[in-house]
Image: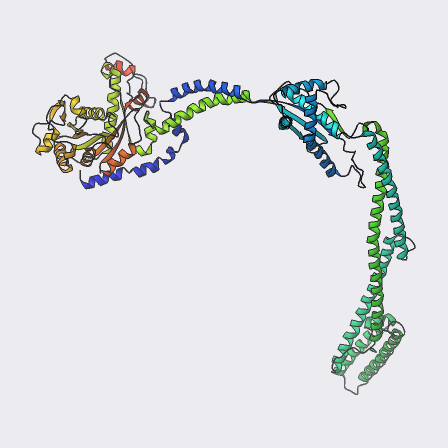
Amino acid sequence: MSSVDRNNALEIYRPEAANDAAAAAAVNPIHIVQDRLQNRWKWMILVGVLLAPLLAFAGYMFAPVTWASVGYVQAVSVLKPLVTETMETERLDDFAAFIATRATLIRSDRVLESAVRTIRSGRPVADASIVAGRDPRADIAVMQGAFAEITDDAEAVAYLRDGLTAVVPRGSSFIEVRYVSKNPEVPAAAVNLVLDSFMDIYGPNAESEHEEQKSKIRTLASQERLRLEKLEEDRMAMARDAGLLSPDFTAATETRQEKLRLVESKMDAVTAEMKKLERQHRQKAAAQGIAIGETPDMTMLEPTSVELEQFEPRLADIRRQVEDQRVLLELANRTYKAEHPALQRITVELAGKEGVLNAARENAMQHWRDGFGGNRSYGALKAELAELSLERTAHMESLGRLNEMGVRLLKVDRDIASSQGELSRLGERLRELDREAESIRKGRIQIVEGASRRGSPESDKRLPLAVVGGIGGFVCSFAAFFVLGSLDPRAFRVSQLQKDAKAGRWLGVVPDMTDIASDPGARELATNCVHRIRNKIESRREDTGTGYAMMVTSAFQGDGKTTVAVALALSYAESGHRTILVDCDFIGRALSHQFHHLHSPGICDVLRRGAIDGEIVEVGDRLSLLPVGMDRTFSASNLQIASLRRLLRTLRDRFDVVIVDSGPVTASVEAIPVASSCDGAVLAIRRGRSRSRLPESVRELTEAGVDYLGLVLNYADADDCRRYGSISKMSAEVAGALSGQPASVTRHPLLGGKRD
């Protein structure tokens, strides 16, 4: 095989590309499970069926079963141990702390030691508060039996504390006292005896507490009345200090605010007049061409035409007549000469009307000065603005004092309202204490429910653990066989090899041909499987015009590579190819032994001599054999690659197909020389053999330069053989027609016509 051909073959198959292409399939978890459990499903199910009941029984027997009983203690929230000025019903955080403290005291050493002493003595406490109808002596008897083997009181206290819990549910006034034990009789007795000891030690003195409550509330009510009187006196004193006839600070404040707004509006008007005088002064100075200085205090406000017309309504009419007369005079000057009577008459009339206008304006000015404008000098306006500013400051200070007084008054009013409400609540509390005298005398801490034995356990894990054990039996069986399949990756099915990207190409299967002679159907199926492998090989190799040398090898000894080589040789010979089998397995020699030429000369003699001289024998129609040979001085260690290549070139010239049987590719000396001398290589693996060295075998072949044709599963099971080597069968209608029996022909619907 030329170097160009070898390069082409390497391009055709690249293990890295195959790995990349199959990477997605390799990580499929379903495929992984199928691969690990091939041919082990029945054993896995059998082991699981055996383990499941054993683990289920163990789980049921060793599962913990605990019993529990609960008693409830209630703390009445309206009865505080001390009455405070904030009222006992308003301080929820204080009540929560109180009830939490009582829950802690239930598990205290003092209470538990008292319960142990009661159990040891056999005498119940004097004021047992257990639910009516329950005999404390029965509880003591139960606990004495539980303490039979506990002689130390400290151990007995620890025994009680280990199973005892006392919790306060969120937002509740109850204390839940629970005891958990493996003995169903102990929890109820332990809870009741602990509650008895707690009530005996920390139970309240009901009579004295009730009277103390009433006395403290009366004292608080008296103090609150004195406080209310003092607040009312302070409010009246504040009104007198503010100079008000009544303590209505709101009306006084509104009056001050109205006066302040009036003064501010006057200041705005005066400021506007002063700005007007300043503007007139600037205009007059600009008209006279003098420097503009500060406005003199004596500067009087000049009235506007509109203001003058308010005092002399005729001014507007007279001004209009003068304007009309001036227009006539201008027209007359254009028409007449200076001495013309008409021009002189118009001039005289204009002078008369201007005189009337001046007199009317002077009269209006006099009236304006006598009225609004007489004292509106710039200095007077400044003095008035200063007075208004002082008045505004006085009003603002007074308003600030009133606001400050109002804030203080508001606080006093709130205190008065709070004091009145507190007096009302204290009075209602006294009335409640009188109405609830009997219930209060029962005490603030009460046992509302004693503990009793439950009919079912608190926690019974037997059934769940039995189910878990049963499932765990199958899981353990699955895990064991999965691990076994991971440690021992054997090849059982074609699906394993097809999904194994490291094994490379897939060619086909060869069935177990041990009993093939007695079963014609099996023989036909095996022949079909081998022919399919041969056709797949032929579809992949190129026709170079010379023979083709094919190596058949395996990863381990005993994989049946000789069987595959012989089957392929028979298939090629049957298809008309001149085929020769070459036995290059210098150690195994299975091919030579199978054809009864173990003692015949062969390849050892040819390679020693350097030429073929009658060593090739006919073993079938178009099928020849070159055995290993008899020369014991020649072995795989003497094999030269160049000599082997020359031999195979000679065989290519004489035969169409040269099939070389060699030793295992990873364990024999001759495998690499044979691989480097052949055109293609087929890798065989026997069903049930390990796949661990398949990647290494493929890598060895490709590195030797041979075209890796693919993998064959030898001794495959019937399902794989039928799938990859099934035989198409003719219909009964066609078989009858071939045998000469008359039969009608069903025509294709698209052809039309009727049956023949």
Residue drawn at point x = 47 percent, y = 23 percent: 472
Counting the numbered discs, the total is: 0
Q: Nearer the viewer, residue 513 or 532?
A: 513
Locate residue 317: give its quadrant. bottom right
Q: Nearer the viewer, residue 237 or 150?
A: 150
Relative to 731, is 446 on the left or the right?
Answer: right
Looking at the image, the residue that sits furthest to the top is: 741
Q: Quadrant of the N terminus?
A: top left
Looking at the image, the residue that sits furthest to the right is: 245
Residue drawn at point x = 72 percent, y = 33 percent: 99
Relative to 246, is 157 on the left or the right?
Answer: left
Q: Nearer the viewer, residue 733 or 49?
A: 49
Relative to 671, is 157 on the left or the right?
Answer: right
Percent across and percent down for residue 16 are: 31, 39
Residue 176 visible from this viewpoint: no
Locate residue 222: give its quadrant. top right
Locate residue 103: give its quadrant. top right
Is 143 above or below relative to 505? Answer: above
Percent across and percent down for residue 318 are: 84, 75
Q: Quadrant of the C terminus?
A: top left
Q: How is the image coloured?
A: rainbow
Looking at the image, the residue that sits furthest to the front is: 151
Is 650 above or below relative to 245? Answer: above
Residue 393 visible from this viewpoint: yes
Percent across and percent down for residue 456 are: 62, 19
Percent across and percent down for residue 585 are: 18, 29
